[in-house]
Image: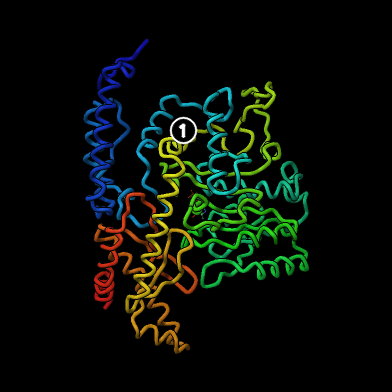
Amino acid sequence: MNQEFDSGPRQDSPDFVRDVGDRVTRIISDCLAGRTTQSITDPTPVAELRALFNERLPRKGTDHRRLLDRFSEQVVPHTLVNTSPGYLGLMNPTPVTLSIFADALTSLINQNQAASHHSPAGSVIEEVVIRWLGEAVGYGEDCHGHLTSGGTVANLTGLKLALHRAAPGVRDKGLVAAGRRFTVYASDQLHFSVERSVDILGLGRDALRLVPTGPDATVDPHVMRQMIEGDRRDGMDPLAIMGIAGTTAAGAVDPLMELADLAREAGLWFHVDAAYGGAVGLSREYPGVLAGVERADSVTVDAHKWFFVPFVAGGILFRDRTFAEDVFQNAAGYIPPSEDADLPPTDYLKQGLAGTRRFNALKVWMAFKHLGADWYTSVVDHQMGLTRKVTEVITELPDWKIAVPPATAIVTFRHEPEALTEAINNGGVNAKGALKKRDRLQIRIAEVIQNEGRFWVSAAPVPGGFALRLNVISWLTDEALVDAFLAELPRYAQEAAADRS
Ligand SMILES: Cc1ncc(COP(=O)(O)O)c(C=O)c1O
């Protein structure tokens, strides 16, 4: 029996569905138009926000019109507008419009991508999307894998594959049975998900060997080799090398080809974390940045970063599906296997951590189909170009220095008045103090920029200390906006300096 809601008509009545749809579409359209002028940050104190939403579990329903109005009036104004063209911030992209609606369609059909018979078309579309991501990154379309909740789980999955190759018995008997002390090698610029992964896999965070980075925020493969050899001499069992294609702070790309050579020589698994940088594989104007990624055993690539789809759509790519299915195999008696075809359809349940899985592949599929890889190429090239322009301008600005030149579409830089430079160059105790002061100055400048609400950049630790970090991550950001930001930089620095005195 259909239940009547006192808050409105039947859930599936066409008039109700259309009314909801029309209203939601209007909200979306208003938000998309408003994001260019809305302040990026919202200064409302959390106590006020709690007061707005703090209520007991509602026993009665609310009319959808009132609820949707509430969304517009009480949620939208209190967001961080990371879809604004002025958001030059973390890896939170401006989603392409069709992918926003695709998310609703995914919810509409509510497929469970755990098993192909619970998502017949969806499972095949996810296979296709994985191949497209492989091709886009430069890993090659001859790959398997699946979408994850993000790069964090993708990195964990990659390292679990590595562990299974080195010690398959760990799956059933645990690390104790392996009786080996595994170590993993990655740049000291790595994302925290790698630390968590070695912990969750039972290797322990001490198993992670942080390879020091140079001024360009990349590792030196020779240093990594020495660390591997040293560990072997000390009775450790090196397991995997992680190369980063786009570090979180500076967007730096490790020398993947040399790391691939090292991994092969040392007999180690090679995982590439291209969670952010994967899209550079589509660049025409900056070719070869990810050269070597094709030699990885596994690759993390997040569609919800530089491929402009809404959260969540992380991804893990690998070559060998059967191997991955051995790693994660489980008897789930209540889900019959789909193994009656010549080429068995993918039951994603078998090759990763997740059980119930959303059909997130739809929004990625629609984004690629709607805009085409060439669109991505032009946007990536444009964004890379903008960060190069920022680099050129800042290099010429007195009292400003580039910290790490851009390898992707992230550039980091510092405000460093002459007195600070002198104190740093003179060395000694004063230099230490000056470096701390310089760190604080960058953090304060980022706060001044964020508080104003027109632009958003962060301060992040890169080799040498904190720097301002500018990531062109919105496809809406254009040269005029970047020029406007650069013109304001001296004022932001002045305000930050004035604040501190
Ligand atoms: C290099 C890198 N790897 C992994 C991740 C984790 O991705 P997610 O936040 O989607 O889990 C990030 C996130 O910023 C990242 O920058």
Q: Residue at x 66, y 24 (%)?
A: 337
Tell which of 14 and 3 is nearer to you: 14
Name the residue beneath numbered marker 1: 362
Q: Residue at x 45, y 68 (%)?
A: 405
Tell me if 37 is positioned left or right of 88 in this view.
Answer: left
Q: Residues within 10 Å of mark 1 (few under 14, many from 20)?
A: many
- Is residue 199 visible to us here? no
Report the amino acid beneath label 1. Answer: Leu
Horizontal and vertical percent for residue 466?
42, 70
Tell me if 358 is positioned left or right of 56 in this view.
Answer: right
Tell which of 62 and 79 is nearer to you: 79
On the rendered image, what quadrant is the N terminus found in?
Answer: top left
Tell which of 193 and 317 is nearer to you: 317
- Is residue 276 visible to us here? yes
Horizontal and vertical percent for residue 129?
53, 37
Q: Residue at x 47, y 56 (%)?
A: 285
Tell which of 1 and 77 is nearer to you: 77
Horizontal and vertical percent for residue 16?
27, 20
